[in-house]
């Protein structure tokens, strides 16, 4: 019987400590995949973001003292993900220049 490996625990980092190009790449991916972000109870610290692979799943994104946490599987391995990047876009803390090939999102809540 093979031993199961547990995911690597990533030390959380403040979002500003991560290269801006990484956030821009993740935000562009979130937009291409048409992910949607919703603020919970009109609180800018608590969000849910839809999953691209699983239409019946959403991940929780929480902003706490400048650190973004996400419940998605990628968060076990990386201090960034497309869900957190989308929240940064919605908060206005990250700007992605629209390209000619990518349409503007219909809803920017």
Image (cartoon, rainbow, N blue to C red):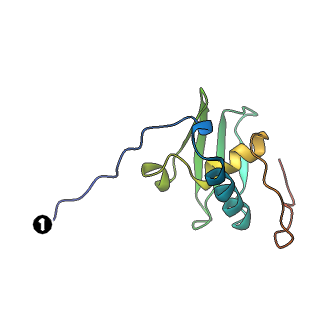
Where residue 103 appears, as percent x and y from the top left, is 85, 68
Residue position marked by numbered label 1 in the rendering: 1
Q: Residue at x 78, y 54 (%)?
A: 96
Taking the image as shown, residue 70 lies to the left or right of residue 5, namely right
Query: Which residue extends farthest left?
Result: 1
Residue 14's place in the image compared with 106, above or below, is above
Where residue 104 appears, as percent x and y from the top left, is 86, 62
Taking the image as shown, residue 100 lies to the left or right of residue 7, namely right
Where residue 106 appears, as percent x and y from the top left, is 87, 60
Where residue 36 appears, as percent x and y from the top left, is 72, 55
Q: Residue at x 34, y 52 (%)?
A: 7
Residue 3's place in the image compared with 76, above or below, is below
Of residue 17 and residue 101, the one placed in the foreground of this image is 17
Q: Quadrant of residue 56?
A: bottom right
Query: Which residue extends farthest top?
Result: 65
Q: Quadrant of the N terminus?
A: bottom left
Residue 52's place in the image compared with 20, above or below, is below
Q: Secondary structure at mark 1?
A: loop
Q: Quadrant of residue 53?
A: bottom right
Of residue 12 and residue 83, the one placed in the foreground of this image is 12
Taking the image as shown, residue 76 lies to the left or right of residue 1, namely right
């Amino acid at each position: 019987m093979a031993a199961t490996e547990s995911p690597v625990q990533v030390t959380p980092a403040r979002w500003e400590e991560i290269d801006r190009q990484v956030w821009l790449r993740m935000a562009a991916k979130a937009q291409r995949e048409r992910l949607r972000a919703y603020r919970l109870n009109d609180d800018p610290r608590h969000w849910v973001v839809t999953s691209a692979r699983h239409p019946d799943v959403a991940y929780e994104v929480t902003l706490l003292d400048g650190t973004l946490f996400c419940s998605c599987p990628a968060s076990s391995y990386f201090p960034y993900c497309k869900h957190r990047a989308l929240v940064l876009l919605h908060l206005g803390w990250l700007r992605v220049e629209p390209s000619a090939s990518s349409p503007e999102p219909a809803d920017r809540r």
